[in-house]
Amino acid sequence: MKITIETPKPGEEDEVIVRCAKVDDRLMRLICALREDERLTGYIEDKIVKLSLKDIYYFEAVDNKIFAYGAQETYEIHRKLYELEQDFAHTDFLRISKSAIVNTSKIAYVKPIFNGRFEAKLKNGEKIIISRQYVAELKKKIGI
Amino acid sequence: MKGISNFVKWFLYITTGILIICGVNYQLAGVEMVSVDVFWKILFSGFATTLVSVLLLPKEEDGKIKMYLKFGLHYAALCIVMIPLGCWFGWIDMEPSGIICMMLDVGGVYLAALFAYYIVDRKQADEINRMLKEKYGDAEQ
C-alpha cells in the first residue's frame, strides 16, 4: 500500500483521505483508531470544552437536548443523536435505546432486568438501560 | 415475523409452566391416570393465555408504575380467562375454593414463565459479559 503524507496549506484543516478498492478489516481498524481520537465540542455552563471520544461514557437525549457523560461530568452537545450514531458507527459507540448511545468500551457488565430489558453498569458506576431490540446489535459489535 | 417468534417463545414458556402445574396438581390430588384430552386442554390454555400475554405484557418503554400496573392487569386478565376455562375443562369447580386454586395456579405459571425468560436473558448477558471482558478487559481506561 502506498502511503503519502502531504502538508495542508496554511489555514486548511487536517484531512485523511483513504483511497482504496475495498474497506477491509485492517483499514477499518485504522479508521476506528483515527476516530477514537476525534474530538467533540461540549458545553458546560458558560465554558466550551473539547472532548475526546475515548473519555465519553455515553450520549443521551433529554428534552430535545443531547448530553455527553464523562466519568463525572456532563456536557451538552449541539448535535443530533442520529448524527452521533452515524458519525461514530465505526467506533465503540453503539445505539442502545431510542435516547442513548453508549461507549461499549466503558461497559463493566450487563444484566437482565424485569420487563425484558437489560441494564449496563458502566465503569464509572452509572447504570443505563439497553432496549431489547438493540441487544443483537451489541452482540454483533463485540463479536458474538 | 418478530411478532410470531415472540408469540411462539411465550407459548412455549407458558405451556411448559401449565404442564408443570398440572403435573403437580394431579400428583397432589393422587390422580394416577389422565385422559389424552388433557394435553389438548393444556395446549389450548397455553394458546389462550399466550394471546392475552402478547397483548397485555408491559412494553419496554413503559415506566415503572405503568409497568407494575400492567403486570397486575395482565395477571387479572389471565385469571379471567383461566377460571372459566378451568371450569369447562373440569379442573376446578366454580366456587370460591376452586377460583382461589386457579388464581394460585395462574400465579405459579406466571412466575415459572418469567423465571424461564430471565434464565434465557441471564445466559445472553453472561455471553455478552464474557466478550466485553475479552475485548476490553476489566480495567478502567
Image (tube, coloured by chain):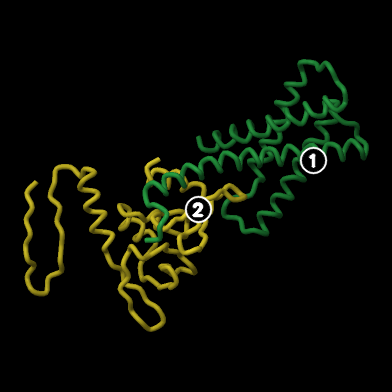
Chain colours: A yellow, B green
| Residue A137 visible in the snapshot | no
Labels 2 & 1 near each other (Cβ < 8 A) = no
Kindly identify the residue that appears in the image at 12 percent across and 50 percent down.
A19
The quadrant the C terminus of chain B occupies is: bottom left
Identity of the residue drawn at 23% across and 58% down: A34
Q: Camera-side residue: B80 or B9?
A: B9
**In this rendering, which labeled residue sits more in front, label 2 or label 1?**
2
The answer to whether residue A87 is seen in the rendering is yes
Using the image, name the chain to which the residue with label 2 belongs.
Answer: A
* Residue B23 in which image quadrant: top right
Residue B53 x/y as whole percent: 67, 41
Report crowding for label 2: few under 14, some 14 to 19, many 20 or more residues within 10 A (C-alpha): many
Return the residue at label 1: B80
Q: Position of residue A135 (x, y in %)?
A: 47, 46
Q: Residue furthest bottom?
A: A46
Percent x, y for residue B103? Answer: 82, 40
Q: Is residue B5 above or below residue A35?
A: above
Up-down relation of residue B141 to residue A117 (above or below): below
Q: Residues within 10 Å of mark 1 (few under 14, many from 20)?
A: few
The chain to which mark 1 is attached is: B
* Amino acid carrying mark 2 in the image: Ile
Residue at the image position 39 percent from the left and 52 percent from the top: B137
Q: Tag 1: residue type? A: Ile
| Mark 1, secondary structure of its residue | helix
Instruction: State how many labels appear.
Output: 2
> Residue B6: x and y, percent?
57, 37
Q: Quadrant of residue A37?
A: bottom left
Q: Would you place residue A63 above or below residue B118 in this image?
A: below
Numbered badge on residue A130: 2
